[in-house]
Amino acid sequence: MTIFYLICAVISVLMTGVYFLVDKKRDIWLLCLFISVAVCDMGYLFLSVSNTLETALWANRFAYAGSVFLPFCLLMMIMHLSRFRFPQHLPKILIGINLVMLLIAASGGFLPIYYKEVSLEIINGSAVLIKEYGPLHGLYKIYLFAYFAAMVAIIIYTAIKKKVVSIKHSIFLAFVVIGNIAIWLVENIIHTEFEFLAISYIVTEGLILFLYGILQDYGLTDTERLPDIPVVPQQISIQPAEQNEDDNIKSFNAVQIENIINTWQAVETLSQREKEVLRFILENKKRKDIAQELFVTESTIKKHTANIFKKLEITNRTELFECAKKYYR
């Protein structure tokens, strides 16, 4: 089994490297997801080559450090990509829950709450922990199920509410979650000494990289080719500066914004990310607030805003809202 853990660990490390090559935007939750997979698979590898019980237990704790935080990172990534609005304190609460779960899972060898008893055996040349589960071991299954259920619920909710940019994103997110659920169920049905979650995490990364073209729709890369657009006359000065944002402008509601997006023909020239920024602008959100919502810098929003104004042949927010009034009914 050691060779399989070695392959998984090598692949997870290589995929982390590929992530740095592919995602120029450095999406924080996607990065944390890849790091968590690498940490988990390295832990499984270290455990398989351990020669003492103490070393094996520390390797097991190392693996749990990645395994516990991985579903959290995946959930945050899904909420981000689905444009699901959540309370600002939610990540801190979830991190607190994650740390509690990690402490419980790491208690083996110290307290009989997660493992009543644990010993080390060498099976087919690989070290394996022989465990007798304690009263709190079932919490980990509940923990994983709760995260998976939350992911599925958010995907369904945002798809129904049409918060996702396109159906492709819903399909992508569903594949990632369902793939993990399927392998997790297999691990619980078929009792073997091999940790199938090591494969599940590789599948997650593989789906993300394989379907990276869908992520481009969210503006996570700069590789998306923009369509040809009419050239704005030189006398028009594009000024997406903050001072042009009028606090007195009345924002549009969600229904009106969708009507504007769907009926204003010039909007079709915008990229998916630019349409997403446009929605926030039509809500009359400030550049700083939009940047926080999308986890990017204000300069990135400024760049998108300039592109939007250029493609719609307008110069500022006031003009944008005046033009948009023709399409919101």
Image (spheres, grey):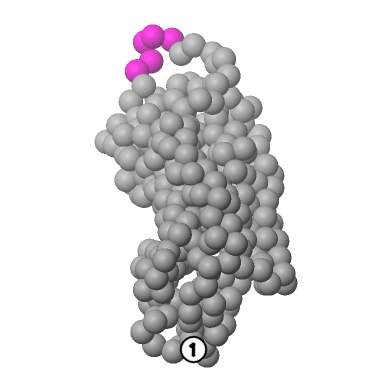
Question: Is 190 in front, or is 219?
Answer: 190
Name the residue located 60 percent from the left edge and 54 percent from the top edge.
199
292 vs 84, left or right, is left
- Give the x, y percent position of residue 203: 62, 49
Question: Is 302 in front, or is 136?
Answer: 136
Q: Which residue is mark 1?
A: 116
Name the residue located 44 percent from the left edge and 55 percent from the top edge.
42
Name the residue located 55 percent from the left edge and 50 percent from the top edge.
3
Regarding mark 1 in the picture, which secondary structure is present there? strand
What is the quadrant of residue 109 in the picture? bottom left
Q: Residue furthest left?
A: 243
Q: Is residue 234 visible?
A: yes
Label 1 packing within 10 angstroms: few (<14), some (14-19), many (20+): some
Question: Is 30 in front, or is 8?
Answer: 8
Residue 208 among magenta residues: no
298 vs 71, left or right, is left
- Amino acid under disc 1: Lys
Magenta segment: 233-237
Q: Quadrant of the C terminus?
A: top right
Q: How many marks?
A: 1
Q: Quadrant of the N terminus?
A: bottom right
- Give the x, y percent position of residue 107: 39, 81
Name the residue located 42 percent from the left edge and 51 percent from the top edge.
35
> Against 211, is 307 above or below?
above
Residue 236 among magenta residues: yes
- Give the x, y percent position of residue 239: 33, 25
- Give the x, y percent position of residue 18: 47, 35
Determine the main secondary structure of the stretch shown in magenta.
Answer: loop
Q: Residue furthest top?
A: 234
Question: Is 161 in front, or is 67?
Answer: 67
